[in-house]
Amino acid sequence: MSLLITGSVALDSVKTPLQEHHDLLGGSASYAAVAASFFGPVQMLAIVGTDFPEKYLALYRKHGIDLDGLQIADGKTFRWSGEYEWDLNKRRTLSVELNVFEIFKPALPEAYKSTPYVFLANISPQLQMHVLAQVTAPKFIVADTMDLWIETQRDALTDLLRKIDCLVLNESEAREFTKETSLIKAGRLLLKMGPKYVVIKKGEHGSMLFGNDFFFSAPAYPLEDIHDPTGAGDCFAGAFTGYLTRADRIDHESLRKAVIYGSVIASYCVEDFSLTRLQSLTEAQINERYSLFKSMSHFDVV
Ligand code: AMP
């Protein structure tokens, strides 16, 4: 079973109080695709410029990611830079250069059109809709978004919500979108706007999954050393959708497991900059942390 992922591919510059790195592999589609690749085949639909380093294409290939939908266009790759405070939950975007993204109007390769599972990683909702309109036999569609689109493309985002099965967003975005301070109210309100499921990510405080007759709350892995939180949300959503694609069924059990696998991969991602940690991640390490999540949140009724 394949998973189609579209989103941004970026060259990121990231500054934390302790380190600074430039031209890192980033972008929502990069993080999501590599995270999902631990669970099965991934097709990537995105755009880069001619300056995109060959070593990053090699990294995608190493993860078995299908690159037929990765357009290499004349021009420069999308660039993003951000800076973290000592509280790594606080990030400031320093610059965004859209570059080749300005001309991105992807046509799905023939082999991608009938892919059953789709993850629309963070890009503009108009682009997410453009991709969705070309998908012919979707079984489960997950979408992510960000504050920028809530502020500038609320109507397009509202339209998108009616066409997807699951929305993944972080807590501040959920509050901003719904204008609710309570995350429980925000989750329920988002459900009423279209998707069957809503996942609200709370960073180091875990995540909550809402369904119409279903609620699941998961902790985050208590990591001591976080080096770069960039892409944690994209990894969560990529692994979440990747696991559901592998399970090929959507029920309470598979959704709970997907949330935990999402949290596991995200927890590894933040242990190093960019996708560095995921390069050496093994199945045994994924299973080990999955078991730790289980024992950590297990509750025996007395
Ligand atoms: P996250 O840490 O999950 O918010 O994702 C960080 C990634 O999002 C970085 O690698 C950026 O390249 C990418 N990104 C930042 N701004 C945008 C944007 N406006 N559209 C698409 N991707 C973006």
Image: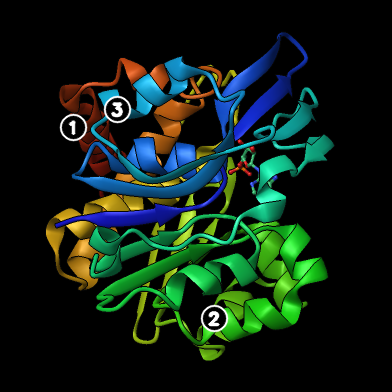
Kind of element beneath mark 2: helix
Label 3: how many Cα within 10 Å (few below 14, some 14–19, many 20+): few
Q: Residue furthest bottom?
A: 192
Nearer to us: label 1 or label 3? 3
CA gap, disc 1 and disc 3: 23 Å
Task: Look at the picture and state if 137 lies above or below 11.
Answer: below
Give the mark nearest the N terminus, 1 or 2.
2
What amino acid is labelled 3 in the image? Answer: Arg
Tell me whether circle 2 and circle 3 mark residues in contact (CB < 8 Å). Answer: no
CA gap, disc 2 and disc 3: 32 Å
Q: In screen coordinates, is 264 left or right of 236?
A: left
| Total numbered badges shown on the rendered structure | 3
What amino acid is labelled 1 in the image? Answer: Asn
Which of the four quarters of the rendered structure image does ligand 1 lie in?
top right
Q: In screen coordinates, is 104 left or right of 2?
A: right
Residue 143 percent location from the top left of the image: 48, 65
Tag on residue 161? 2
Tag on residue 287? 1
Label 2: how many Cα within 10 Å (few below 14, some 14–19, many 20+): many
Kind of element beneath mark 3: helix
Which residue is identified by label 3?
Answer: 61
* Residue 128 or residue 212, whichever sits in front: 128
Residue 175 appears in which quarter of the rendering? bottom right
CA gap, disc 1 and disc 2: 33 Å
